[in-house]
Amino acid sequence: MTFNRWGTPDESKPLSPSVVRLLRTALGIQQEQTPGDAEADVVLSEVRLTEADIAALGALVGPGYVTCEYAHRRGRARGKSYPDLLDWHTKKTIDAPDAVIAPGTEEEVLSVLEYCSEADIAVIPFGGGTSVVGGLTPVSGGHRAVLSLDLTRFDKLEDVDAESGLATFGAGMFGPQAELELAKHNLQLGHFPQSFPYATIGGYAATRSSGQHSAGYGRFDEMVHALTVVTPTGILQLGGDSPASAAGPDLRELFLGSEGTLGVITRVRCRVHPVPEAKRYEAFRFPNFEAGARAVRLVAQHGTGPSMIRLSDEIETSLNLSSPDGMAGGAATSGCLCLTMFEGTPEHAAARHDETRKLLLEAGGTSLGEGPVRAWERGRFGAPVFRDALLDVAGVCETLETATTWANIHRLKTAVGRALATSLTKHGTMAVVMCHISHVYATGCSLYFTVVAKQSEHAHEQWAAAKRAASEAIVAHGGTITHHHAIGTDHRPYMQSEIDPLAVTILRTVKNTLDPAGILNPGKLIP
Amino acid sequence: MTFNRWGTPDESKPLSPSVVRLLRTALGIQQEQTPGDAEADVVLSEVRLTEADIAALGALVGPGYVTCEYAHRRGRARGKSYPDLLDWHTKKTIDAPDAVIAPGTEEEVLSVLEYCSEADIAVIPFGGGTSVVGGLTPVSGGHRAVLSLDLTRFDKLEDVDAESGLATFGAGMFGPQAELELAKHNLQLGHFPQSFPYATIGGYAATRSSGQHSAGYGRFDEMVHALTVVTPTGILQLGGDSPASAAGPDLRELFLGSEGTLGVITRVRCRVHPVPEAKRYEAFRFPNFEAGARAVRLVAQHGTGPSMIRLSDEIETSLNLSSPDGMAGGAATSGCLCLTMFEGTPEHAAARHDETRKLLLEAGGTSLGEGPVRAWERGRFGAPVFRDALLDVAGVCETLETATTWANIHRLKTAVGRALATSLTKHGTMAVVMCHISHVYATGCSLYFTVVAKQSEHAHEQWAAAKRAASEAIVAHGGTITHHHAIGTDHRPYMQSEIDPLAVTILRTVKNTLDPAGILNPGKLIP
């Protein structure tokens, strides 16, 4: 990915004249488009590692696999949150990791962690670099330097057991690469988060990623059979062949979501499944979000079986989805758009489709045919570049998400939407806040918010205030601080409300045991 | 339950004359039936607590809620494994907990744990007393006495959120009591382990229980939203309202399966669902276990949706299920019997049934109609009393279980079956070893073995050797040491093979943090 934008340069898209007009009218965004220069000559922080360090690290992994080169450091200095991207637009000097290292084996990772523990160097594991919660900010935590530990050499599909539906991946394999390798066996993971083109298997595991087909295939943490984790204290093998076990606590769950603070995930054994023979698509319109949410809840609770189901609120439906060139072809200019997909054998997909559509129609939905779902599928990974285009015209564009019980979603949605709008208005800018449900469970669902506004003079403070207001509303109204974006640095202030104080003590104790020098991702996740 | 048998006295059933004949012919079991006397005057170990201890404990919970009475101590001295039951037949003195305490609030549990930490008293949390892995053996672990902590006063359905499908239970609620309370709201848990009539909600959570409808409703650990756990260091609230979260490690998974060694589970918030409107039943016959296992695998991997599916091997089919008065009505005297159930709305159950039966018939099954499934459903909780009847004629009767990947089940099944038969033959006794699959996953399944043999002169050693042989075969052939019976004392020697040495260190570290005096269930679970 380009260091200061989402995606590769050829993915970049300027805003259409109609969108520019809309932004001007609705939000007062006036600025001319000034696309960020991918080759901009940003100044990076001074390298704090010595030549002796680099030589010593080179001796551990091979001299070609450690570097202080500008482009490598710059490419690993930030993730892809709005504040991360804003830094490239606003800051003269960017703090970057002092070096990048790419070990090739678990033993090499262990020796790097041992060296860094001894030599007082913080280590930030790096997969695809798609964090949107400050997960890659090079916080030193008082250590004398920061090393970015790149996992891309762990890039093999190591084994496939087609009969059991299991495959073992190197943690550095990218989503598309994993799917291409699996396709040779007529298998797939079926895990498609929006970051899919650039995210890695290890990143999925370390952050509890959730894909757009979570209704059908589950969250990534649910797919994981076994993990290899390298800690400064040693190499851990967690989980085995058994699909389930009652042999005590499940320690995989201590490392899933650990975001590189307890160890470096190097290998993941996952559930895979045959490439579906058939896919079916149908979109529905509901008169309002309440009716749509009730219908989606019934689908989840009756287990009618879509592999994907999502529901946009009225604002998202009207802004994103109903423009003549948009995905609903103008069919859903009012109400709420609901998209569904069904996968499997032709009979399986048809049966699930029939049962689901019957329920959605009975619950007040109107069919819009398959067009809107196919349009969504084509553009499903494309949304993040819109954010860069908005930044180019000095717009705010960011997303945040939570989840709660079905009984609580409207209260939570109202509170978060109001908190965002109120905070941005205080900074003198109008805001559009959209929301959708994209992950459903029998007991509740996620709420995913997209915010668009005009940047104020103090853009960092403007968003920090809005994010704080939203986070406090989430905490106060029974939501989780993150359903699938993870904690990083941005959500860390809210971990103390999210988990019990004694649970924090447990996490710190485990961290101290595995990483006594505290070098792994300091300042992230654990409060 | 009767202290020395499964169930209540009126559940007790003598063996039928035809079974006695079969046992005599096939296994040489000759002894006349001598039903164990439930009122037998067993001698218990001396009480090691002082009057001052009892007074102090009584001051914490109320004097009526702590006792050293014979019947109370005897009723909590053992679980219900074959070696546990054998103890009542063979030992003159039974080591029992020194006292039984029944706190009524979490604060009282905390004060009891604080007192015991200070006063050097081991604590064994006690729910329904159904452990079949030595989970209740009163091991003192070097402490000066043992206190059985009875949770039956945590017996309330505390809240119900029917819209979200969530309910909060006191950990001491028994399965049937929970279902009766939920039925008032037209809801159910749908969790039916064989221990259902006598097991508690807290026990389900502490041991990662798996119910006979796990295909439809999941394992119990998958149903848990939130837990309250009292440790000697404080009270922990784990999990919240959100159906899923990416906020770091999932610490519920540290306490699920912790078997009272890390804390006392006092409250559990679980997923519940509407009482199904319709149930459908169909049994199938497969020519052999391989064909049946393949068919059951396809059902799990295609997600055709039975709420219950199980497959007996040839021996179990012929012995247990095909007698003229047995469940298959003589229809499956050869081959393997497969039972299926479907639940939900009438349309949902019918669609799942149609898709599943089509697949099973294509995979070589022959329909046997619904009779065998209905017969199984009637007798589903009745099997354990057969074990007592066998003990009364000096028979061995025990079960053990494991799980592995689909690709590995035949290798594992053969190895465990052979290990059991070889070991028992060495002790001069013929053995019948039966096996069934009763929990299926996309990637693998459980294997549940039932062993029947004649007791040798050294009955304890005979079974210990057989169990050791089976456990070593499980470890050597890629199975988990337990899929749903838990670890207790019986499986503890195999934990070191089951989990990584560094994982053991993590468990010990967490234990030391929460229970620094080491009073909670010493000698259990953690190696």
Image (cartoon, coloured by chain):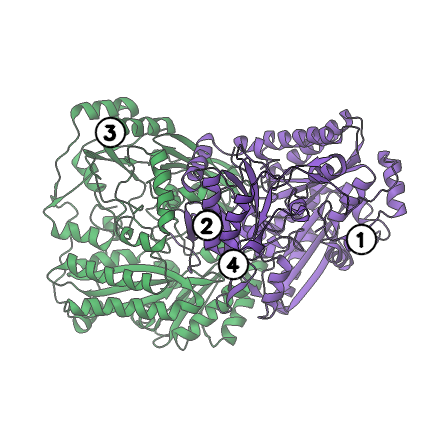
Chain colours: A green, B purple
Chain identifier of the residue bearing label 3 in the image: A
Residue situated in front as seen by the camera: B259 or A45:
B259
Say if labels 4 and 2 share a chain: yes
Question: In terms of sequence position, does the residue under pointer 1 or pointer 2 come before the other?
Answer: 2
Q: Earlier in the sequence, mark 4 or mark 1?
A: 4
Q: Which residue is mark 4?
A: B270
Question: Could you say where residue A481 lies in the image, as x and y percent from the top left?
Answer: 33, 57
User: Of the residues tagged 4 and 2, which is closer to the observer?
Assistant: 2
Between the C-alphas of marks 3 and 2, the distance is 53 Å
Q: Gap between marks 3 and 1, in whole Å?
A: 68 Å
Query: What residue does disc 2 label?
Result: B110
Point out the frontmost of discs 3 and 2.
Answer: 2
Say which element carries label 3.
strand
Q: Chain of mark 2?
A: B
**Mark drawn on residue B328:** 1
Under circle 1, the secondary element is: loop
